[in-house]
């Protein structure tokens, strides 16, 4: 029996004020357009897409770092969009984040252990001695020693700083961690170490991850399921192995073709680079919020209906979901 989702996002829309256009009325820019997804207990959901697809905005909306225009974000049975402007500390503790650049969130004038102890103090956990012990324990669990507690951010490598960020989240015993491009700034060997660390921590704690990335190869190694965003819209979701074995949406196929890890041989690498050049650019010609498929100007299977009707996200016979007019009633049209 499938467990109930820990996080259940329904019809999430996030729009920003885009200012006035040539003195006319104010405009809004839709970053996330009616996105629905869920994360189950102990699961990793990968959220992928090209730059500007809306994946980071989705994560920030879940973290309550940006305002939600419409839709619901249900966490453990509570709609957090109705919590008001002040987010309860209980939610902040249960839902933590690991961002791309840990250096930006570490005070260069303080030793790195203060990132953990300050967070514990903010949540009223323990006295000073207990917070120090808890920080040391968190450092040890992420592969750092007590000697690292009294070092400054500039004295650590990029991988070590990211381990500090993970330790800060881990110390609060969260139930969900939003990893927003958490390994994209690291070299390949360090990426592998951090991915393995996240997997080990999930195994020992049972926490869930929303893993946001643009690299399908990295996402493949850690995710149980993958959701694909394009132009602020969800176009496909499927279990990871199924998505790579049988991608349904033309955009998903283009992403996989453009991934270097998908084509190890020389001829296939050249084919991947051509696919990346052909499919990897953002489509500025299609403003968000307009009817139609956001991939229609780059799709080799485009039909007339793709320009006028937005394809709904529908469940297919194999359990995956896809928003494409090539599929109707769970079967290929």
Image (spheres, rainbow, N blue to C red):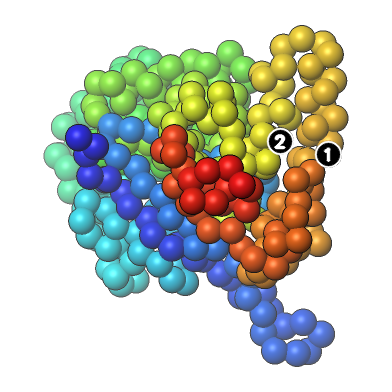
Q: Nearer the viewer, residue 173 or 28?
A: 28
Query: Pointer 1 and pointer 2: residues touching (CB < 8 Å)?
Result: yes
Q: Position of residue 50 (x, y in %)?
A: 67, 43
Dot 2, crowdedness within 10 Å: few (<14), some or many (≥20)? some
- Which residue appears at 73% of the width and 29% of the height? 258
Task: Assign a secondary structure to mark 1.
Answer: helix
- Which residue appears at 63% of the width and 75% of the height? 28
Q: Nearer the viewer, residue 222 or 227?
A: 227
Q: Quadrant of the N terminus?
A: top left
Q: Which residue is mark 1?
A: 278
Q: Position of residue 97 (x, y in %)?
A: 41, 42
Q: Position of residue 62 (x, y in %)?
A: 40, 54
**Which of the numbered marks, if any, corresponds to residue 261?**
none
**Is 73 left or right of 226, judged from the image as shown?**
left
- Which residue appears at 81% of the width and 62% of the height? 285
Q: Position of residue 268 (x, y in %)?
A: 79, 17
- Which residue appears at 43% of the width and 63% of the height? 11
Whether residue 36 is visible to the viewer of this picture, yes or no, is yes
**Is 137 left or right of 283, judged from the image as shown?**
left
Q: Which residue is mark 2?
A: 254
Dot 1, crowdedness within 10 Å: few (<14), some or many (≥20)? few
Real-space Cα separation, disc 1 to disc 2, in angstroms: 9 Å
Whether residue 106 is visible to the viewer of this picture, yes or no, is no
- Figure disc tally: 2
Task: Assign a secondary structure to mark 2.
Answer: helix
**Is 223 left or right of 175, judged from the image as shown?**
right
Can you say whether 219 is above or below 210 in the image?
A: above
Farthest residue in the bottom direction? 24
Query: Which callout, 1 or 2, points at the residue further toward the start of the chain?
Result: 2
Which quadrant would residue 137 be assigned to in this image? Answer: top left
Q: Nearer the viewer, residue 3 or 132?
A: 3
Which quadrant would residue 271 be assigned to in this image? Answer: top right
């Amino acid at each position: 029996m499938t467990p109930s989702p820990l996080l259940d996002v329904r019809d999430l829309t996030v729009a920003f004020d885009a200012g006035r256009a040539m003195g006319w009325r104010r405009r809004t820019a839709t970053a996330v357009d009616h996105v629905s997804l869920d994360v189950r207990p102990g699961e990793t959901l990968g959220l992928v897409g090209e730059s500007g697809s809306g994946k980071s905005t989705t994560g920030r909306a879940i973290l309550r770092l940006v305002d939600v225009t419409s839709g619901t974000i249900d966490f453990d049975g509570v709609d957090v969009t109705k919590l008001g402007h002040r987010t309860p500390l209980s939610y902040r503790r249960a839902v933590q984040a690991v961002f791309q650049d840990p250096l930006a969130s570490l005070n260069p004038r303080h030793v790195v252990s203060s990132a953990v102890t300050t967070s514990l103090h903010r949540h009223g956990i323990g006295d000073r001695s207990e917070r120090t012990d808890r920080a040391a324990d968190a450092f040890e669990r992420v592969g750092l020693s007590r000697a690292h507690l009294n070092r400054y951010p500039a004295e650590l490598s990029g991988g070590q700083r990211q381990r500090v960020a993970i330790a800060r989240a881990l110390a609060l015993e969260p139930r969900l961690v939003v990893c927003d491009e958490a390994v994209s700034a690291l070299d390949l060997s360090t990426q592998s170490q951090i991915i393995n660390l996240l997997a080990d921590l999930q195994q020992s704690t049972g926490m869930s991850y929303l893993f946001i990335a643009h690299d399908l190869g990295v996402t493949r190694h850690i995710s149980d399921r993958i959701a694909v965003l394009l132009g602020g819209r969800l176009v496909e979701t499927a279990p990871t192995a199924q998505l790579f074995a049988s991608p349904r949406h033309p955009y998903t196929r283009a992403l996989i073709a453009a991934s270097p890890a998908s084509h190890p041989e020389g001829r296939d690498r050249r084919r991947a680079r051509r696919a990346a050049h052909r499919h990897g650019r953002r489509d500025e010609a299609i403003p968000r919020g307009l009817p139609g498929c956001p991939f229609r100007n780059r799709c080799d299977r485009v039909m007339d209906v793709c320009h006028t009707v937005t394809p709904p996200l529908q469940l297919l016979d194999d359990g995956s979901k896809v928003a494409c007019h090539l599929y109707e009633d769970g079967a290929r049209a």
